[in-house]
Image (cartoon, helix red, strand yellow):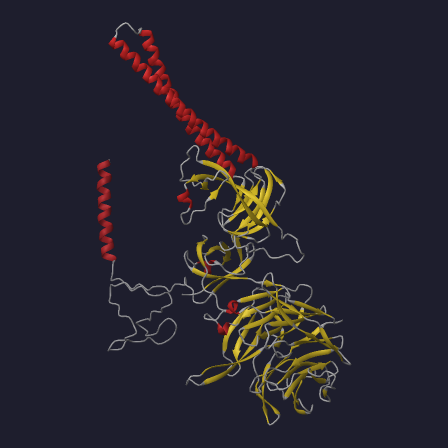
Amino acid sequence: MVRTLVVLALLGGVGFVFYAWASSGPEEKITKSNERKPDRATGVDDTGGPRKEPDSAGDSDAPRVSSGRVRVVRVARDDYLTEPLTIPEARVNIIRSQVVGAARQGQILVLGKEIPPDGRRQKPRSSREGEGDAVVPVDVPFLAIEITAEEAKRPGVKAYRTADQKSWRRWDKLDPVDPGKLKVLSEKRSFELIWPRMSVEEGELIGLIDPSVARNDTQIKIAKLSASEAEWRASGKTKDEALKRYESLLKAAQLAPGSVSPEELRGAKLTWERYIEDENAKLHAINVAREELQQALTLLSLHEIRAKISGEVKEINKYLGEAVREQDQVLLIQNPYYLRVEGFVEVQQAKKLAKGMSIVVEPIHPEGPGKVFRSHRDTINAVAVSRGAEPVIVSASDDATIRIWSVKKGRNAQTGKTTWDGKELWQVEHPSPVRSVACTGPAAKKDLCLSGTADGVGRIWDLDDLKKPPVELKDVHRGGINAVAFSADGTRCATGGEDRVLCLWDTETGKALSQKEAHGGAITSLSFTPANVLVSAGRDRTMRTWSIDRGKLVLEDEGGQLAGNVEQLGLFHRARPGKDGKPDAQTLVLIDQGRQLSVRSLEDRQQQGIILSSSETVNFTTFALFSPDGRTVLTTGADNRLQLWRNPVFTTHGRAAELRQYIWRDSPTTCAAFAPQAPFVVTGTRDRNVVLWGMPAEDELREPEANATIINVGNFQENSTKPVRVIADVFTPTPGLMPNGTATMVVYPK
């Protein structure tokens, strides 16, 4: 039966091989799935187009594939970055922290930072005299070893001299523990009381729990070591004497047999051997005393509170004079420079990331107001800032006034940070609510202010002489004036209103030079370029450009389409190298497109960069303004988030990074203006406040370099919709990166 089955299997195998050989033909080419093969009989491919015959000379673009060969086509991969990848709202965590606990129980004698020998104190002085500024002296015990007078004179040796005229230095772990050479001394040190965010170094002494008992115990152990050594020496002498007696008896027995009884001889030998063992026991007692002294020193050191890591004091749980038990938490130290950042990305983006990639972690800088000016009785509609290093702020309100405020820059002596102060100088009353305001720029000859009111009248005020009657701009607008602007030289000004009319005026005389119905809706924004080109925007969601020809407005460009949420759009003029090496001018404008702002060139409407909202559901609203140097852009959103961005045009990778989040949660922000020659920006709010905000320092405006490395990219499945965790460690100290806060992770393409 088995033989029959084997034969049948062999016959079946031979038949299958013969069938495969007979039915096989030449191998066909492997083509892409979207290639169409033409029908050779009809000359038409399956798309209905004519069949293309190959050129007799050969088609250089078409691959030559001979019959029987296989063609393998590599599929393009999408696992590398072509543009910056941004991971917002990444969580910042501490890597290194130390919970400092009490290792022994007792009273806290001191908790703070030691004052160096030069007397320089590091703690910020309290505003109230004597509050927490006291210097606390304390005796810190330590073990000392006796040294010679010559050794005490060696450079680098800190010697201590006692009343018995002996010289000592601090005992080191490498020093021998010799009896009679050790002593507990104390050193008087001065400390500043501890304060939050106090910097500490690894191993630094920052506190002391009363060590009186441990100090006395150490003295006892030193005395016990000396006593054990004395007993060992006495035991050695006794052993030597017993040996001499035994040898004397042994010699006498040899010289005069019978003169010494065997019992007496054995007793002498036994006494000698007993003292040998006694000497060994005393030697072991010395070693035990040494270990007990080491134990006492360990217990003495446990009364010291030392930092095991470098960092800052985050929490203070106990204070001077309080009693603590073992393991009580005294304070918490964190190192704010060793941080770990965790964020989440989609699967398709996670495929482009790998362990070891260098990234940039950008801190989110929340900042409070530098100064709040309160005096208005209704909503702030517009703000402006005059020229000069010490300018004035002009605010316009529905309470029918403009108010003028002084601004003074200072510096906090304790923290070194910039401070702002000021007060109300003037209150200028109007017959109706004031809707708009503007000031002349640095190139103007006069320091002027232009206000536009709800009754359609503009007024030009001389800020150097406010008692002088204003120049009135009237008899043109049939509704409120929403937007006003001065030309660069201050000789002309423009107004735009609810009636859709744009009007050009002579600043000196108040004469209307030209007027146009400029938009299909109310005009909301006006800006002049240095070349006297006027840019207007309105609620018809358009931006238009106007030139001035012999005092007349001439429409140059219909402009771009706007989303309609940002009513006040910024403009920035800059000089740049031209193609032929000569200076070339470019004017940048901000185009509102909902969740993003497009930075475009006014001359050719080419996009230069994009500012993308940090929230996927919030659009930009109200205003978007360039700073005077064009390096930053101020925006606000529907969530009342006031943000300062780095202008993407001035970055290497063309990405707009968030530099500041100005925090004002009380009510929406309605308007804003940069100081043309001072480092601040001012905003107005619906709750009647004028708010001043400081600008970032020069080093913060520079584009950051890589400061972190990806250490892990979470596992993911190809078709999964679950976000993938990305973890990076920050290896460079980054100002503003706060533990337990949030940051933005940015991965740039190589």
- Residue 535: quarter of image: bottom right
Furthest-right residue in this view: 431
Q: Residue at x 49, y 73 (%)?
A: 650
Q: Residue 557: image x %, image y %?
A: 56, 85
Instruction: Tell me: 62 left or right of 657.
Output: left
Foreground pick, 238 / 501: 238
Q: Farthest residue to the top: give it.
A: 258
Q: Does residue 656 appear anywhere in the picture?
A: no
- Residue 501 in the image: state x and y as whole percent: 67, 86
Q: Which quadrant holds the N terminus?
A: top left
State the residue lying farthest toward the bottom: 550
Vertical arrangement, residue 453 with respect to residue 409, above or below: below
Could you say where residue 122 lies in the image, as x and y percent from the top left? 56, 56
Q: Residue at x 24, y 9 (%)?
A: 255
Q: Nearer the viewer, residue 542 or 733?
A: 733
The residue closer to the viewer here, 377 or 179, is 179
- Tell me the quadrant of the picture where the C terminus can be found: bottom left
In the image, residue 90 sits, relative to residue 372, either above or below, namely above
372 on left or right of 605: right
Q: Residue at x 64, y 52 (%)?
A: 132
* Image label count: 0
Q: Is any atom of residue 66 visible in this view? A: yes
Q: Is residue 180 left or right of residue 103?
A: left
- Image coordinates for residue 521, horizontal then vertical, percent: 66, 81
